[in-house]
Amino acid sequence: MSKKSNVSLNRRQFLQHTVTLAATATVPLYISGKVLGKDGAVPPSELILLGGLGINSRGGHDLSVFMNNPDVRFISICDVRKDRREAVKRQADKKYRNNDCTMFRDMFEFYEANPSMNAVLIATGDRWHTMATIVAAKAGKDVYCEKPLSLTIQESRAVEKAVNRYGRIFQAGTQRRNIGNFQLAAKLVHDGKLGKLTEVHANTLNPYVTHDWLPAQPEPHRDDVDWELWLGPCPWRPYNRRYITGGWRDHYDFHGGGILEWGTHTVDLCQWANQSDETVPIEYWATYNKNGDKTSRVEAIYANGVKLVCRQDGWIGLGTCSARYVGEEGWVETGDSGRMEVSSDSLRKELKYFGMPGTSPDNHIREFLDCVKSRKKPASNADVAANAHIASHCAKIVWDLNPAKLSDTSKFFSLKFDPVKEEFVGDNEETRAANRLRTRAMRDPWRC
Amino acid sequence: MKQIFNLILVLLFPVCAAFAQDPDWYKLSDDALNSKGAEIIRKLLNSTNEAEMLVIVKPSTNDDLRLRIKIYAYKRLAIYGTKAAVPVLVEKLEIPKEGFYARYALESIPGKEVDAALCEITGSVKKPEVLAGILTTLGVRTNPESAVTAKSFLTHADPNVKQSAAYAYASTAGIAAVDFFTQKQLDSLFADSAFLLAEILASKGDMANALKIYDTLSVAGIKPYQKEAALAQSILARGEKGIDLLVAQLSSELPANFDVGLKVARELPAGVAVTKSMLAVLDKQTDSIRKAKLIRSIGDRKDNESKKISVPVLSEFVKSGDETVRIAAIESFKNIGDSSVLPILIDAAKQKESAKVAQVALWTLQNMPGKDDVNTAIGELLVKGDKAARIIAINLIKERRITSAYPILNKSLIDPDAGIVAAATDAIGQTAGLDDLPLILDLFIKAQKQEDSDKYLVALKSACTRLPQNAAAAKVFDVFEKSPVPVKVKLLEVFNVIGGKKSVEIVERCAWEDAVEVQNKATEILGKWVSQNDIELIAAVCLKLAKDSKYKNRGLRGYIRLARQFSMKEEDRLKFCQNVYDLASRDEERLLIFDVYVRYPSPKMLDAAAKYFDSDSEKVREKAAETIVAIAEKLPAKSHKAASVIKRIIDESKNETLKEKAKRIFEKQ
């Protein structure tokens, strides 16, 4: 089991909550006002030169947050889509009132042309997160990468290995580790307020994904959309515009399905609450309703006996990405509304009022920037993110392999997993199949 | 080998026939394939029989229409294929578009037959990109017998092939590859694989060879960041024996090397020797930013063994000097501080020279370890301290939840000093008990300025978040019922924070009250109710509004929101939707039920949506069609029986995109 995580308000949040310093809330914490020039200018040695890969809607929001920090200078964008490259350049140039942001289609050219760039924001579609992070780490860059990081168990670990091999700072875009209500919920568990922890519940979505192709359309000019690069390490398929405009979701080759979509946030929260950041559950099973239909719920058990429940339904209604922790003496549930519910009046005493919705990445991004300078591992570092992803992938694999319908609902099978060897344990058809789903080949020249 | 394969196929064909995958499937016309393709795919997805997959993969025809079907077979072979599939797959490797799918399957198939076949074909593969892919797969598979093949491509002309060969060689050769990866003029293309080999050797306990590789890389003519990474690994692999190297990095003028030192220092195991060497570097350091970074690194090591030597040094940095350094030293006490540093931190929190130093000191005080001794000292500060110290103490009592000091804190709410009152107001929400609610309510009502009123309202909500529901609701209601309308409107929000039966009753009553402003706010709040525990009560109130009030539409919207957002049984959710549809008088509200169906996709939700495909309203029909397709897309084909209605969408919908989606679903039925 891991060391306890820091669940108090971080210094950034603290300062934001302090009226006297509210006006300086965007000032980097790492540098004192005296070091900053009178005009707020940051000395060159403390300026973080940032680049971006695949920035669209979510990435655009992240980028705005990054650029609101005075010690960040966004200098270059790489995207296989011309319209997105140009849109991001406009965003950056408008912010800095110049025409300096450079644009690239190919990430190797992007790194070659920007040797002084310190860090990158990766907000491509999920299919690219692993390889883009690995290439960035190999190029000596620190990385803030949107979730999910990977499409397989092996990719999850490969991200961690590359980041650690090259000594890079990595923060996954799982910002709830830096948001007050989620921190307090974990703290209640860690402080023993719920008694012995028995269950952790993660709000996930329907795991289903399709292998199907959309109808072929003529490929655009390579400079407008580089379809080969868009596909990257994924298997070839014919072009269809819907893929590049968000329709890649729910396609097996590009997306991990609903457990990964939200589980990378919420399973991660459960891992944290259970103080199991350094491991994953050891057995997983799918569930069926009374009609014999497979539900979207997957359950698992940790070596310490705590049960992990990944479920779409049955939430109190505290917002998206909810998590619930159940102990022998009570429970707590919270979500993106910032509100928390607990099982008893005695636990209510422990609560705080969080008026702000719980999805802002401001503190998470600031923590990343501080860590780029200090070289400390941030909260959602590659090690903890890899394990949360592996747990989610295991859940998805057991869901995939169990049949859609069972005449006898007691006949579902579970899969045992060895967190050290990172393999499913046993010698039967299901286990062998599960082990083969831990990895997927990548198209050349990509490998992780 | 080919003969053996043909024999296998001959033996397998009867099995194929039994599973009814037609060996001539690819000869079907495009039209026929368009209609039968779904059936072939469905069989594949439900089969674990390798022979059925091979029947699909075998034909050489691979236009997009047929390749779309073949990929299912390749992907199934990746899960269920055996050595029997190897000859078929290897033959496909060089086919454009399709070749990768063959490698995709081969990479997962267990057994040395795959490695042998892949090694053999490397001798004849023409395309460098295919060769690179095959070598990568050999690397992923880690069979030591592939090492010779991998090695033979290390000097290939194509850089991708060379890199893949190096990866395969490092993955398969073990100690035999050390000489290659420790050559002086190592190509930077090979650096990543050298790291990989070092990690493999280290995981097997061969630290000597791992170090040999790291040391070679750290001085090789490779990219600077590759060398820095090697240096870091070299120090970590040495442990305490790497302290000299660590000190060299921390003392380096080069920013990148200094960064290596900072990171590595955090990762080295606890031990006085490391801390001592870091303190020595700190002593010589003159640059304030570097000093601050070193101090943070020392703090982040959380090395209790070394506290005796680190805390006194860092304490001196807290007292005076550069602001950046002071802040770093203060913060380090969050990890390694104890009651001995309390006076220093309180002084830092009180001083007025630097607001930032004061705030960080306060934050550290809130979060530093130690309970009884630290808390007692803080309680005393509230009684005996000067104004600045009292404000600090109030904050600490709130954040550290020092319950023994709450009674004194409450008195501070009516302190003559405005600064003390402001701090106490900020704190009271976190500390108030039931008996304190009247005091906060009183302050809220009497507040003269909007900002004060807002602060007390936040304090009230904050307190009510923590207090027993019905008792808190009763206390607030005592004041509420005597309050003027503008105050009532604001206090209504508090009942939503409290939740519970009593709060629902109060808000319900307000929905029917005379004052329009109160009615308006109450009905708005019912539509935002947050507690799942109150769902039945809120549902009843919303339904009542929907049936018999001028807030009919608001009632309906609040009611359907419960079905959309809250947990309930599927039959209840369907019933909520039905009720809304029956009671609604406008399409705007009727359409809301479809959002619920889509959010909880199931065969029953699909059936429910399908009922409205014959609605008189065009808007409802269109929304129903969209909903049916959206749900059907998310469900496995066999789990629902919506073929007839999907066929009608194909025939009748004017939305071309929707029709296209419906067609694809229909094919899968």
Image: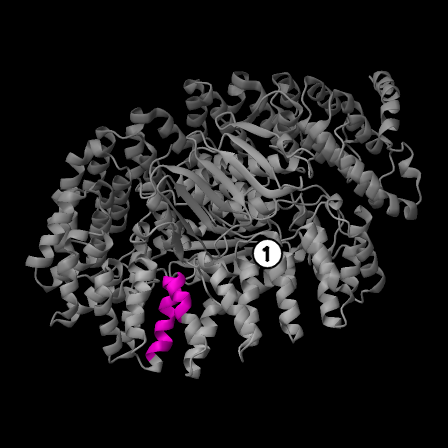
The number of callouts visible is 1
Q: Position of residue B116 (x, y in %)?
A: 71, 18
Q: Is residue B76 above or below residue A312?
A: above
Task: Return the residue found at the far bottom.
Answer: B515
**In this rendering, position of residue B40 left or right of residue A57:** right
Residue A287, quarter of the rendered image: top right
Q: Is residue B488 magenta?
A: yes
**In this rendering, position of residue B239 left or right of residue B146:** left
Q: Residues within 10 Å of mark 1 (few under 14, many from 20)?
A: few
Residue B433, quarter of the rendered image: bottom left
The residue under label 1 is which amino acid type?
Answer: Asp
Q: Residue at x 15, y 55 (%)?
A: B405
What scheme was used to colour the molecule?
A: one colour
Q: Position of residue B186 (x, y in %)?
A: 52, 28
Compare residues A141 and B474 and report the one nearer the observer: B474
Task: Return the residue found at the far left.
Answer: B384
- Tell me the quadrant of the picture where the N terminus of chain B can be found: top right
Compare residues B440 and A246 and report the one nearer the observer: B440
Disc 1 element: helix
Main secondary-structure element of the magenta-colored stretch = helix
Identify the residue under disc 1.
Answer: B572
* Chain under numbered label 1: B
Q: Residue at x 69, y 21 (%)?
A: B115
* Any part of residue A283 in sight: yes
* Any part of residue A226 in sight: no
**In this rendering, position of residue A256 left or right of residue A17:** right
Compare residues B11 and B569 and report the one nearer the observer: B569
Compare residues B587 and B128 and report the one nearer the observer: B587
Q: Is residue A98 above or below residue A372?
A: below
Q: Position of residue A294 (x, y in %)?
A: 64, 41
Q: Which residues are magenta?
A: B487-506
Q: Position of residue A128 (x, y in %)?
A: 59, 46
